[in-house]
């Protein structure tokens, strides 16, 4: 389903980008043909990434119809948030920390609140297996290697691209080391695959906004280690608490990998722009708002969280209503038999009544 959603959202995102770009220009060129370039495809992939992050919170508990409806609704609010924070406020964000990680995570958590079944948390299929862990480790390795180029993809100058790559790699290294250490400490002297597959990437998320800024290498390392620690402890402590007390069963732990590290990265951008804008040397970035840029970063945090939560709540209500049309039985949660033709040797772990 991720294949289908990603392909659909990239196309839908291009249409929405053209619309909001025309809106920013007061629709002066709206009637003319718009050439589609590489940046439209990149933005489409970024938008698809936000939707797939949200998908991770409700994975295994929804129907394909519900997923497609979410894939239609969420990109509009993704671009609304981008329109306000980037087009109008000119927020500093080099790697989509606001628009992809924070927005996608908290939109998904808001939707998840309405779609969490009491039986989901203790479902026998809500676990990993050795084969899936191996595939997930391969995915983690690819993401770890590609994240520096992801954060540097739209950097406007060569020196900013270099900074983005260096800071992201250092941050990823810090997150990886602390994740292995903490995972062993909190998991009974053994490594938890879930921690290693996810928290090692938190260093890339935390650098998603300010990677291109002139920050100290030690700062990048410290932020990566802090993000990795928060992510690891989130999987161990916070995820069960959210499921038990807040009625939010976060299937993939998007709050731990994208939500909290994304907010941490936003706070980093606030202090980084504050310090750099007050510097007395010759390095003064061309911020749209000069010394007031930190306030813009702070406003972007509130706007992103506000749009994500309100839009997620509305979408969650819609998907909850759709669940009455065709509901997945609890025995088929986290299982492929409901929507896929399966081979004869497929093992059905959940026993039928």
Image: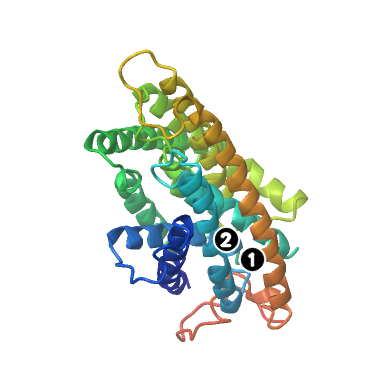
| Residue carrying label 2 | 127
Secondary structure at badge 1 equals loop
Crowd class of label 1 (few under 14; some 14 to 19; many from 20; radius 10 Å): some
Q: Determine which quarter of the picture holds residue 169.
A: top left
Q: Which residue in the rendered view is the most extreme toward the top?
A: 280
Residue 200: horizontal and vertical position, in percent? 43, 42
- The location of residue 319, given as percent across then percent down, is 67, 71
Is there any visible trace of residue 235 in the rendered image? yes
Whether residue 101 is situated above or below residue 67 in the rendered picture: above
Total label count? 2
Dividing the image into 4 quarters, which one contains the C terminus?
bottom right
Residue 287 coordinates in the image, percent (x, y): 40, 32
In this image, 314 relative to 67: left or right? right
The crowd level at tag 2 (other Cα within 10 Å; few <14, some 14-19, many 20+) is few
Cβ atoms at labels 1 and 2 below 8 Å apart: yes
Q: Is residue 250 visible?
A: no
Q: Where is residue 336 in the image (x, y as percent from the top left)?
A: 53, 77
Residue under the image location 32 percent in, 37 percent down: 164
**Against 93, is 18 above or below?**
below
Question: As drawn, is 229 to the left or to the right of 312?
Answer: left
Q: Name the residue under label 1.
A: 124
Say above or below: 254 vs 127. Answer: above
**Image point 57% across, 60% down: which residue?**
127
Residue 236: quadrant of the picture: top right
């Amino acid at each position: 389903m991720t294949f289908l959603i990603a392909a659909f959202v990239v196309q839908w995102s291009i249409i929405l980008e053209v619309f909001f770009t025309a809106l920013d220009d007061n629709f002066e060129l709206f009637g003319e043909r718009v050439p589609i370039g590489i940046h439209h495809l990149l933005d489409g992939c970024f938008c698809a990434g936000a939707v797939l992050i949200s998908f991770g919170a409700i994975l295994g508990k929804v129907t394909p119809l519900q997923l497609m409806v979410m894939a239609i609704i969420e990109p509009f609010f993704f671009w609304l948030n981008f329109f306000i924070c980037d087009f109008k406020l000119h927020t500093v964000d080099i790697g989509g920390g606001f628009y992809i990680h924070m927005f996608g995570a908290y939109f998904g958590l808001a939707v998840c609140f309405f779609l969490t079944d009491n039986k989901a948390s203790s479902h026998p299929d809500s676990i990993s297996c050795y084969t899936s862990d191996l595939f997930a480790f391969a995915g983690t390795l690819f993401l770890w290697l590609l994240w520096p180029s992801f954060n540097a993809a739209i950097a406007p100058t060569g020196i900013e691209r270099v900074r983005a790559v260096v800071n992201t790699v250092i941050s990823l290294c810090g997150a990886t080391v602390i994740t292995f250490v903490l995972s062993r400490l909190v998991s009974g002297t053994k490594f938890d695959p879930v921690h290693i597959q996810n928290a090692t990437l938190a260093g890339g998320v935390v650098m998603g906004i300010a990677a291109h800024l002139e920050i100290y290498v030690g700062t990048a390392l410290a932020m990566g280690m802090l993000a990795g620690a928060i992510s690891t402890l989130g999987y161990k402590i916070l995820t069960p608490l959210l499921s038990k007390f807040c009625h939010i069963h976060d299937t993939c732990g998007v709050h731990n990998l994208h939500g909290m590290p994304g907010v941490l990265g936003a706070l980093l951008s606030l202090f980084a722009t504050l310090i750099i804008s007050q510097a007395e040397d010759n390095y003064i970035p061309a911020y749209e708002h000069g010394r007031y840029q930190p306030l813009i970063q702070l406003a972007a945090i509130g706007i992103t969280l506000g749009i994500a939560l309100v839009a997620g709540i509305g979408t969650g209500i819609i998907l909850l209503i759709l669940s009455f049309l065709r509901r997945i039985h609890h025995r088929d949660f986290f299982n492929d038999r409901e929507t896929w033709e399966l081979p004869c040797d497929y093992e059905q772990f959940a026993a039928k009544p």
